[in-house]
Amino acid sequence: MSETFRSTVTNHDEREATEWERSVIDTVVSLLGGDLHDALLDPNMPHLVIDPARIDEVTEALREVGFSFLLDVTAVDYSEHTDEHPERFAVVWHFLDRPHGRRVRVKGYVADGDSVPSIASIHPAANWAEREVWDMMGIPFSGHPSLTRILMPLDYEGHPQRKDFPIEGPERAKQVRGELQGNKHLTSWKELHDL
Amino acid sequence: MGLIGQPTDNVILGKINDLVAWGRKYSLWPTPFATACCGIEYMSVMTARTDLGRFGAERQSFSPRQADLMIVIGTIGLKARPVLLKVWEQMPEPKWCISMGACASSGGMFDVYSVCQGVDEFIPVDVFVPGCPPRPEMLIHALVLLQEQIQGKPGVAHERRMFIRREVQQSVNSEFQARQAEDVVRKQGQAT
Ligand code: SF4
């Protein structure tokens, strides 16, 4: 691997890795070998593209070198940019090294329906974040203590942050397209109990 | 039967319903169901500058069981729907509802998967207040309109209730007529 790295930010030049960035990348390279698909350098943090099946090992290794704080677990739906990305979804983890104020971004591509190992046993903060990713994107996390919806009602159908989910909700989308005539009004407020 | 003596200028004759309605309309106890930014505007309605107490709705009731006017203020998410319904059903009759703001009335700008598109989906709303947020004067106007409705002037919810009553009446009528027709057929069968 060369000493300079590309950036994910467009119009941003390649740059040399600083000492700590170099050591983080080396740690992950020695752990994963070929499962580290790509290493990039954004203006303020390294950006590692890995095989998501090994995120639990990467989390442990990063914790050993100081990244002991989980900032966020989130996901991106790239279904409108399939030419630039190998799979439909990407799960993104951010880790923070608090004493030094350093961050690392780890990203793994998953296909629709594939599950990703949960890191809730390592970082309890991942529990709700992973439930949110499941609720909004429909990416299941294997080994999660209770993978249920967290934002939408428990009986909601579909995963609303997917690009193919109608933004008005399925019911209103039919109205907008003219497939459903009139407004769906409940004739009595007792009917709401059955919803 | 007759009145003892003559009615003087100090006596008003009227229906008891009117008297009760007159009492009710000047002593509404509102319970605010405030979930979003319109709630801030509602607070200013209750302050000294535009005092809602001048219209009799002085006593804020934060318990729905001691209230007769619910003011739905703000965006109602899908998860808040059952909560709102529970609060509404705890209020004793007679009760009225004002939907304040674009969000409560129609979903407003939140035409999205997670927001209820108007509380009149499941609660009979008497007065809708447009605006994002409505000015305090508009809520006062809504309260005055509601007072007129309580005194007997038909309003939105009244028409809706009448519509439902007509529908029910029609279905009952048609069922009754069908039964009568069956009876006629049966009696003819017995006679022959
Ligand atoms: S109508 Fe406007 S001000 Fe009122 S709750 Fe909705 S967004 Fe907020």
Image (cartoon, helix red, strand yellow):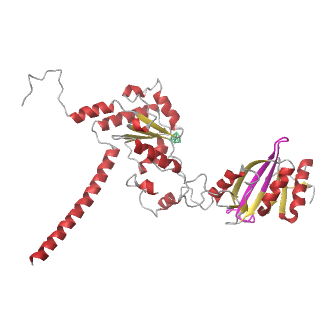
Q: Is residue B123 above or below residue A82?
A: above
B124 lies left or right of A21: left
Q: Is residue B140 above or below residue A84?
A: above
B129 lies left or right of B23: right
Looking at the rendering, the stretch of residues picked out in magenta corresponds to: A78-106
Residue B51, image x, y percentages: 43, 26
- Does B37 lie within the magenta span? no
> Residue at left 41%, top 58%?
A182
- Does A99 lie within the magenta span? yes
Q: Residue furthest left?
A: B1
Task: Report the front residue among A1 and B109.
Answer: A1
Task: Report the front residue among A139 and A117.
Answer: A117
Tell how many labels. Answer: 0
Q: Can you say which quadrant of the picture contains the N terminus of chain A?
A: bottom right
Residue A135, image x, y percentages: 62, 56
> Residue at left 15%, top 73%?
B186
Residue B8, image x, y percentages: 13, 21
Residue B114, image x, y percentages: 54, 52
> Residue at left 84%, top 64%?
A35
B44 lies left or right of A9: left
Can residue A190 be seen in this snapshot? yes
